[in-house]
Amino acid sequence: MKSTLDLSGIKKLESKLNKLKTKEVDFGYFQSTGTHSTAKMPYAQLAWILEEGTRSNEGGYAIPPRPALKDLASKLRTSHTEFETEMTPFYKTFLENESQSEISLVRNAAEHLKGRYQYNMEFWYIEGSKNTRNAPLTLALKGHNRPYEDTGELIANADYRIT
């Protein structure tokens, strides 16, 4: 009696994984995203100003940095386990379902990254942080301690692109 090992499933998996490794996801703001309605500047430019902050003539910050993107990227580099755990159901579906395309997995990952970025933006822009709270004089003038007032427009227009 001769037995033959069926490798078709492994070959299909290898094919799916090879297609997957050619995909990349960019997320943030793109030129085509548009212009912020009240700031009257492209979303990408406004997000960059908020990410990097701006310097005043005295050398301090006129607008303190609120590094939502850098913070997220740093967390993904140092502890990608959380992201991988959150993505496990999508990986499982991709690997077990022959009809699940690699683009579906990449789109799910992109949506997940976009959601994490938007959450970070909400923290940095709306809630602030201990390092970027308003100065006492600013607090007295504004009447609140949120460093940035956002309508949600900038956060809602974060996007991703799959290449």
Image (cartoon, rainbow, N blue to C red):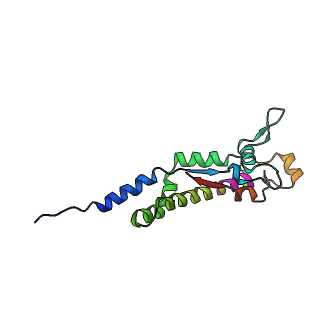
Is residue 107 located in the magenta-colored stretch of the structure?
no
Is residue 124 located in the magenta-colored stretch of the structure?
yes
Where 56 sits versus 104, above or below?
above
Residue that sits furthest to the left in the current view: 1
Q: Which residue is found at the position 48% from the left and 53% from the top?
A: 81
Image check: 158 left or right of 110? right
Nearest the viewer among 86 and 29 is 29
Nearest the viewer among 84 and 132 is 84
User: Residue 117, image x and y in percent?
Assistant: 63, 54
Magenta: main secondary structure: helix
Q: Which residue is found at the position 43% from the left and 67% from the top?
A: 99
Q: Which residue is found at the position 57% from the left and 48% from the top?
A: 75
Residue that sits furthest to the right in the current view: 141
Nearest the viewer among 3 and 73 is 3
What residue range appears in magenta?
119-126
Image check: 94 left or right of 140? left
